[in-house]
Amino acid sequence: MPYRLNPTSAISARGVRRLRKESGVTLLMVAVGMFALLSMAIISLDVVNVYIASNQAQKTADAAALAGAEALVSSGTTSNSVPLNSVCNGSNGDADLRAQAVAAQNTIAGAPPTTVTTSCPSTAPPYNPQIQVVITRTGIPTFFARMLGSAASAVSATAIAEAYNPSFDPANPLPNRPPVAIHGIKPWLVNNCSTSSCNLFFMPTTYAIANGGGFIGHKWTLQLAPSSQPNTAQFYALDGPAPLACPATSAVSCSQLGSGTYHDNIACENGYNFSNGQLVGPGQVFQLAQPQPTQTLTTGTECLIHASGPGAGQGQDSFIPGPPVIITGGSNNPNVSLRLVNDIHRSDSVVTVPVSNCPGGCDPTAQLQIVGFLQLGIQDVTPSTTDPTAGEIEVVILNAAGLDPASTGTPITGAGTSPVVVRLNYQ
C-alpha cells in the first residue's frame, strides 16, 4: 500500500501561505521594541539630568542660606534688637549680599542660578533670626523634550538657615532648647557679676541676655584682674591643656610659641569642648591661674591677631562697631584674598571667652560654673597704663550666648569656636 502523509503532522498549503504573509512581523516587532527601549533610555537621561540639576540647586540654596545666616550672626541680631530687615536685605543687606555671592559661585547644570531671591521670615523668633533663599535655574537642556517641542526645563530649590542662639528669650525664659558645645575658647574668664552695681551680660537665674543686649556691637576694654574682686571689665587667666594646633613660630609675632600653655592657649587653637553646665576650677580641665600671669598676654594676643606690634594699625583685621559690626581684613591676614577687603566673613581676631558669676570675686579654690559666652572681635592689645607688665585688650562685642546648666541631651557642635550656631532649618 502506498504511504500517505498524516495531515496532523504536516503543514497544510493554507498554513504555508499564512506563514509567508507574517514573515516580516518579527522584524517589525524588533524595530518597535528597539525604538521603545531607546526612547526610555533618552527619557531616563532627561530625568537624570533634571534630577542632578535639582540636587545641585538644593545644595546651592543650602550654601547660600548658611552664608546669609553668618551675616545674621556677625551683625548681632541674635543678641540685640537689631532691625532684622535692614541686615537681611535692606539698606545694609549684608545677609542678601553674602547669599548672592555664594550662590553665584555654584553652578547648576553647568551654569549659575538664573535667579536668587532672599527674605527673612517675619515669624522667626527674635533671638533665632532666619534667612530664606530660593534658587531657580531655567533653560536646562533636555534631549527627548526637544523632540516633543519643549527645548528646556527648569528647577528650583528653597533653603532656610538660622542663627541659633542658646540664650533664653526674656519673653519666654524657660524654652526647651538643646545644649551647645564649642571649642577653641580663649583662657580669659570674664565676671558676669550678680549684684545691682554690675552691668550684667546674662541674668543669673534665666541666663537670658541682660540689658536688652545693648552692649552688642560696642567697644570694650578687657584687663587682667589684679585682685580677687574684678569688675566686669576684668578677667581671670585660666590654666588649661596644651593647645590643639599652633601657627609656625615664623608667623607674625609668634616667636614665643612654646613658652607656656597660657601663652599658647591665647595664640593657638584649643580643641577642648565647653558645654552647658561646664565648670572651671580645682579638678577641672581649666583652672584659675595662680598667680595671674601678665607677661605673655600681649605677645600671645599679637600672635593670635597677626599684629606686628602693640596698638592699632599693626596689620591685624579691624572692626567697625555696630551693630551691625563690619570686619575689614588687615595687611597681615594669612589669607591673601582677604587682605584690605571690607566686610569679610571670618577673622582669626574673632574669639570666644567664658563668663561666670562671681559676686564677691572669683575664688581660685572653688569650682566655678560657666553661665555663658561672649564672642569678641579683638581690635588690638597694648601695655596697661596702670601695670606695664600687664596688657589691655580692645575688643568689640559681637555676640552673647547664655547657657542653661539644666539643658540636657546631645550638644549641638556645629558652632565650632562660636557660641551662636549657624544651621539649616528643615521644618
Image (cartoon, grey):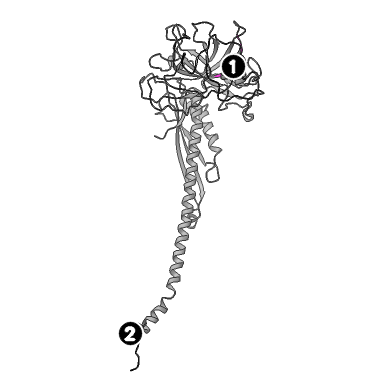
The spot of residue 328 in percent (x, y) is 60, 24
**Residue 358 is drawn in which quadrant?**
top left
Between disc 2 and disc 1, the foreground one is 1
> Disc count in the image?
2
Q: What is the quadrant of the C terminus in the image?
A: top left
Give the residues drawn in magenta, as a range. Answer: 377-384
Residue 70 appears in the picture as rendered: yes
Relative side of 46 to 394, left or right: left
Coordinates of residue 366 in the picture (x, y in percent): 44, 10
Q: Secondary structure at mark 2?
A: loop
Q: Is residue 227 above or below residue 381?
A: above
Q: Earlier in the sequence, mark 2 or mark 1?
A: 2
Few, some or many C-alpha atoms within 10 Å of disc 1 (few <14, some 14-19, many ≥20)? few
Pick the front one: 250 or 78: 250
Bin the neighbour count of mark 2 within 10 Å (Cα to Cα): few under 14, some 14-19, many 20 and up. few
Main SS of the magenta segment?
Answer: strand
Amino acid type shown at disc 1: Gly
> Quick one: 143 or 270, which is closer to the camera?
270
Q: Where's residue 389, x and y in %? A: 61, 8
Tags 2 and 1 touching, CB below 8 Å: no
Circle on res. 7 = 2
Would you say 59 lies left or right of 387 here? left
